[in-house]
Image (tube, helix red, strand yellow):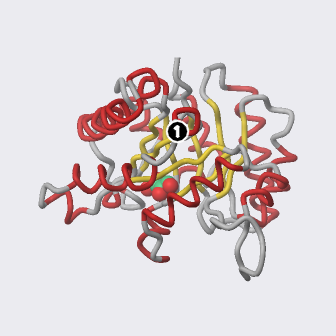
Amino acid sequence: MRKKIIAGNWKMNKNLEEGMALASEVVNMVKDEYQGSAEVVLIPPFTHISAVSKIISDASNVFSGAQNCSNHASGAYTGEISTEMLKSAGASYIIIGHSERRQYFGEHNDWLAKKVDAVLGSGLNPIYCCGETLEERESNVHFGVLETQIKEGLFHLNESQIAQVVIAYEPVWAIGTGKTASTAQAQEVHAFLRNLISNQFGSNIANNITIQYGGSVKADNAKELFSAPDIDGALVGGAALQSRSFVDIIKAMA
Ligand code: 13P
């Protein structure tokens, strides 16, 4: 059975003290209230990963992650952070190619493919993001856009590497807008993505790869989204900044 993963991407929010408080609350609430099988991942800013990783260390189903990384292993790259640094801070997952990185920081698929390699090279799991803009959806080119993002970012991998990858479908028009994709829209894309993976890597790998949905996931729409056969969890932004709303989303996953 494929892994279900609910991840909270804190983006550039919370100072260290606030982040530690949020992580402690989530861990305690998950311990007390959640009996399901999903993995929970907390993805704070870089500066908090070490502290958050210590806070979650005794919860077997809670992990930490990073929002980005360098594609280089080490050296004179001022301001960059390597996958080995993130691993040593306790991170298990690294988000690659979030639409905000693509949009505001010019990250392209060829560069993201190298970041995926760096993450895998350190034995960590990339959460590779894809998603179309509103304009692309309205002009009906979204399947082509998604296909290019997946092919250029992931198709160079071998079978054992792709098995370590989590895919997150995050339609840009649904991020932070309160406008969630309908369950039918999300399911349609998730099935399309799984089919792409199947054609390239075979049905066994495709059936086992986790595909998360992201974009205005809230406690009140999570259950319906999670009922779709190809939606294996969520990458949550705004609603992950409060323990109650985040844990309610986790509890929507059996
Ligand atoms: P929101 O949940 O705030 O729409 O953000 C989604 C997201 O970008 C998670 O990576």
Give the residue drawn at x 65%, y 46%: 243
> Is the C-beta of the residue carrying label 1 under 8 Å from the nearest atom of ligand 1?
no
Q: As rendered, which of 158 and 188 lies closer to the eye?
A: 158
Give the left or right position of residue 218, taking residue 57 as reference.
left
Q: Residue at x 72, y 36 (%)?
A: 62
Question: In the picture shown, does residue 105 fall above or below 163?
Answer: below
- Residue 102, placed above or below residue 37: below
Q: Position of residue 53 (x, y in %)?
A: 81, 48
Residue 181 vs 132, above or below: the answer is above
What is the count of numbered marks? Answer: 1
Q: Residue furthest left?
A: 139
> Residue at 68% of width from left, 26% of height from top?
33
Viewer-closest of 85 and 161? 161
Residue 86, position as x, y percentages in the image: 76, 57
Direction top: furthest residue:
1
Q: At which x and y percent is residue 139?
A: 12, 61
Query: Which residue is tagged 1?
Result: 158
Q: Secondary structure at mark 1?
A: loop
In this rendering, position of residue 86 left or right of residue 201:
right
Give the crowd class for mark 1: few <14, some 14-19, many >=20 residues within 10 Å.
few
Name which residue lies at 42% across and 61% down.
Answer: 176
Seen in the image, is 179 located left or right of residue 75?
left
Q: Position of residue 168 (x, y in %)?
A: 45, 46
**What's the amino acid at mark 1?**
Asn
